[in-house]
């Protein structure tokens, strides 16, 4: 495995250049460049239609970071987890739609992100987990248990189609 390159940034150094070049064709492409909406092909490895080429975006992200190991049989799963974790760390990128084949993300302007962030309140309950409550104007509460993989799956499975939440 190559040395880790922590200076490679997901959005600026990897996603946007590859989106603009069309490097991965339908595996990573713009849905609406002007609105910052892009799609990542996200077929599950257990799908009967899965092929090694389906995880090429995740593999190339691992290569860019110096974390690619061609001898690891769990590679595609690990690379996808790393991409998911990196996307979740980006404050200005939100998953707005997902299905069994793809995830749709939107790059949000800082002002949009700040308005969105203000609608969330976090309450720490104990050292093993915490809950986030959405405190929108309609007083509806969305509860989510934030625990490692469970939280990541819940965030990815959320329906971000609410226009009031995303400012679409």
Image (cartoon, rainbow, N blue to C red):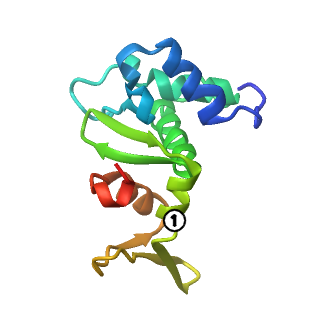
In this rendering, position of residue 159 left or right of residue 128:
left
Residue 24: give x, y in percent of width and height.
45, 15
Residue 27 or residue 91, whichever sits in front: 91
Residue drawn at (47%, 67%) of the image? 147
Q: Residue at x 49, y 21 (%)?
A: 19
Q: Circle 1 sits on which residue?
A: 117
Task: State the quadrant of the N terminus.
Answer: top right
Q: Is residue 154 above or below residue 81?
A: below
- Is residue 168 visible in the rendered structure shown here? yes
Q: Residue at x 33, y 76 (%)?
A: 137
Give neighbour class at mark 1: few <14, some 14-19, many 20+ (Cα, 10 Å): few
Could you say whether the residue bearing mark 1 is in a helix, strand or loop? helix
Quarter-of-image position of residue 13: top right
Establish if 109 lies above or below 56.
below
Q: Position of residue 2 (x, y in %)?
A: 74, 25
Can I make out residue 71 in this image? Answer: no
Residue 21 location, x and y as percent? 52, 12
| Direction from residue 138 to residue 72 in the image, left or right | right
Query: For residue 104, which quarter of the picture?
Result: top left
- In the shown orientation, is residue 142 left or right of residue 124? left
Which residue: 34% across, 38% down? 103
């Amino acid at each position: 495995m190559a040395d880790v390159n922590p200076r490679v940034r997901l959005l600026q150094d990897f996603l946007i250049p590859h989106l603009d070049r069309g490097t991965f064709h339908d595996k990573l492409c713009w849905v609406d460049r002007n609105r910052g909406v892009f799609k990542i092909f996200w077929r599950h490895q257990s799908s009967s239609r899965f092929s090694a080429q389906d995880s090429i975006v995740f593999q190339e992200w691992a290569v860019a970071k110096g974390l690619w190991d061609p001898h690891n049989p769990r590679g595609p799963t690990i690379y996808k987890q790393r991409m998911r974790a990196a996307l979740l760390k980006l404050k200005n990128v939100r998953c707005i739609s997902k299905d069994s084949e793809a995830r749709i993300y939107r790059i949000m302007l800082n002002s949009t992100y700040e308005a969105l962030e203000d609608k969330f309140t976090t309450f720490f309950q104990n050292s093993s987990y915490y809950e986030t409550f959405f405190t929108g104007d309609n007083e509806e509460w969305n509860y989510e248990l934030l625990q490692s993989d469970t939280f990541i799956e819940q965030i990815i499975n959320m329906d971000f189609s609410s226009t009031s939440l995303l400012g679409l």
